[in-house]
Amino acid sequence: MRYSTQIKPISYLKANAAQVLRDIAEQREPMVITQNGEATAVIQDIASYENSQETLALLKILALGNQQIEQGRVVPAAQAIARIRARAAKA
């Protein structure tokens, strides 16, 4: 993806908002909006946003898991499964 083709000034967004939203939804590429020559915002379609949020959540879970491994906070899989089954039986 080349961001250089997806950079527009805020005046373009104001004048072409409906078309910008259609283009973003079709192309599924973010658009960088500038104000006074500086990048100030990124617009993206909702599906791409949701995908990126899910990816970030998974990365956070992996990082937390790695941190727990480094701290020695681990239990054997059989023990973890037994705990889960015991909780499920109580519910």
Image: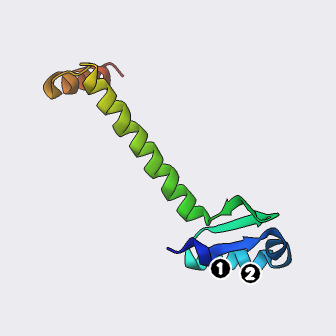
State the residue at coordinates (54%, 63%): 48
State the residue at coordinates (57%, 58%): 49
State the residue at coordinates (32%, 18%): 90
State the residue at coordinates (61%, 78%): 5
Q: Nearer the viewer, residue 57 or 43?
A: 43
Is 26 located above or below residue 69 in the figure?
below
Q: Nearer the viewer, residue 50 or 78?
A: 50
Helix, strand or loop at label 2? It is helix
Q: What amino acid does circle 1 point to?
A: Asp
Mark 1 Cα shell of 10 Å, populated few (<14), some (14-19), many (≥20):
some
Residue 37, percent from left and from top:
77, 65
Determine which quarter of the picture holds residue 89: top left
Residue 45, percent from left and from top:
61, 66
Is 29 located above or below residue 41 in the figure?
below
Q: In the rendered view, does 37 fall on the left or right side of 25?
A: right
Determine which quarter of the picture holds residue 19: bottom right
Q: What amino acid does circle 2 point to?
A: Gln
Determine which quarter of the picture holds residue 26: bottom right
Residue 19, numbered circle: 2
* Marks 1/2: CA–CA distance: 6 Å
Q: In the rendered view, does 50 fall on the left or right side of 21?
A: left
Residue 15, percent from left and from top:
85, 78
Q: Nearer the viewer, residue 20 or 88?
A: 20
The residue that mark 1 highlights is 23
Helix, strand or loop at label 1? It is helix
Q: Quadrant of the C terminus?
A: top left
Q: Nearer the viewer, residue 75 or 73?
A: 73
Q: In the rendered view, does 36 fall on the left or right side of 45?
A: right
Find out whether the residues at labels 1 and 2 contact each other: C-beta distance under 8 Å.
Answer: yes
Residue 66, numbered circle: none
